Amino acid sequence: MSRFLAIVMILAAFLAGGNASAKESPAKLGIKPAGSDDAYFTLTLNPGDSKQLTVALTNLGPATMGARTYAADAYSLINGGFGVRLHDEPVEGTARWLEYPSETIDLESAATVTRTATLTVPSNTGPGEYIASLAIETAEPIPISDSGNAVVKQIVRQAIPVMITIPGERTPGLEIGDASYRLVADMPSVVFPVVNTGNVHLKPPGEFVLKDARGSEVSRLPITMGSVYAHDTTSAEIPLAQPLKPGQYTASLSLADSKESVQVSSGPRTFTVSDEQASTSQPVGSGSQRAPVKQATSAIPGWLLPALLGSVVTALVAAGVAFQLKRRE
Amino acid sequence: MGRWKGSRMKTWVAFATAVLLALAITAPALAINSVTQVITGGVMNAFVDDLTLPAITFSNTNQTNTGTLNLTADDSSGSTSGWSVTMQSSPFNYSGSNNGTNIPAANFSITSANPPVRVTGQAIDVTGGPKVPPTGATGTLDAARTVLHAEQNFGLGIYNQDIDVNLLIPGGSAIGTYTAFLTVTMTPV
């Protein structure tokens, strides 16, 4: 019997040890609505309304942890999605509706404390969707191992959205600005500003098309954007599989949110790639999707090809005429 | 007939008494045997546990230092909201005695966000994730980038992800130490 137990214990230890890739977190801080199974706040309020929001702040790490909690503006990330301003960035948006002073506390292991934020909707607020955020993070940055002499320390953060709907007319709207070419750290991309001009959040997929000066298609890629929040501006950044050669290009981006019946196209937007921007032609790394690039071996200006063709035809006609004249002689 | 009726009545009374007794005996037993199990949620947590950025020597020309961040994303919240992990870097601030200048955050970039690997919990789903967003995961880290995402009802587990990074060190950067703060954020949307 004891031999059997020993075998079971050895097997259990082996199985536990086999899960080697489960790394120990340097911080396990959490924030969520207190007394609720919801992961975040979703509220419908009228202008002038006020509501108390109580959050539970938890430390599930093995030791006491210094934690900072604060209210922050939410914004649309590049290519959409829920972004949260950092603790030292100014509060200029919907987070101003939250009375929740920034605080640093020592949270004991396995402890949960509650804090209450007071949300007040300004009386002159128009109908639509709004978003802010509440966050908790490590008060002190934590070193990451093996980062050499370029030292990187991390701030481990969890943030939850506070989504507020003010009842009334919904007026969705979207605009796309001029295209530009970026080559940063050898990574090429085409970037369009995207502005949510309406009062509802949108999540628009779409398509990107790139043509060279001759009108030949260089690249085409379906785009999936995350949330672009009402009254907010972000950018659609389309990574290219390789840098563009010097010359003029035309890019277009179309986006559509079928749920909100919004459809918009940038139309053809022209930009130029300079010699300096085209200094490298190495394909960049893999990973998330990149727009494939089909380019001619040399970037010939659009007018040059017809001109060359015309010259050849003229030369042939001239040669033919000369040959005929010579034969008659 | 009357005797038969009386006997039938007695039988019914006896039967009813037996049922009542049985209920009286079993009811407390049933109450004692009922068990309530409450499961409370844990937290969502994402962190980088390793980064390899080799030390480099001084140069008058630009140098590129490449490395790999190992990210762990853990959804132990018990909710089914789905989640996202973003990363954003501060500039690399110089410390040393050679009058060096800071390296901008835009010089630190993600070149590849590799598909995640499940450590434990819910299997990875092609559609629901966790997965690398189709676009936007690669690029400069002066702005927040979503590197991993799980749709609603997916990503209930622990996942590892390798993220290849690139630090462009300007030529003539002074000898010393350059320190950056990387904010790793996990959100339930």
Image (tube, coloured by chain):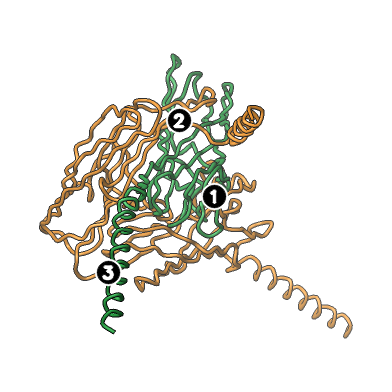
Chain colours: A orange, B green
Residue A307 in the image: above or below residue A317 = above
Q: Secondary structure at mark 1?
A: strand
Give the residue number, with chain letter if any, for mark 3: B13
Do tag 3 and tag 1 residues touch (Cβ < 8 Å)?
no
Query: At which x and y percent is residue A271?
Result: 48, 58
Question: What amino acid is at disc 2?
Answer: Ile
- At x 30%, y 72%, the residue is B12
Chain letter of the residue carrying label 3: B
User: Which residue extends farthest top?
Assistant: B97
**Where is residue B64 shown, x and y percent of the image?**
58, 33
Which of the numbered marks, if any, corresponds to residue A59? none
| Residue named by callout 1 | A188
Q: Amino acid at mark 1?
A: Pro
Q: Is residue A201 left or right of residue B61?
A: left
Could you classify mark 1 by the number of other residues whose Cα lies within 10 Å: few (under 14), some (14-19), or many (20 or more)? many
Question: How far is disc 2 from disc 1 in space, using C-alphas?
Answer: 20 Å
Residue count near mark 2 (Cα–Cα under 10 Å), binned few <14, some 14–19, many ≥20: many
- State which chain disc 2 sits on: B
Q: Quadrant of residue B142?
A: top left
- In which quadrant will I find the C terminus of chain A? bottom right
Q: Quadrant of residue B14?
A: bottom left
The spot of residue A203 in percent (x, y) is: 39, 63
Could you tell me how far apart the alpha carbons at marks 3 and 1 are, in whole angstroms? 91 Å
Image disc number at residue B103: 2
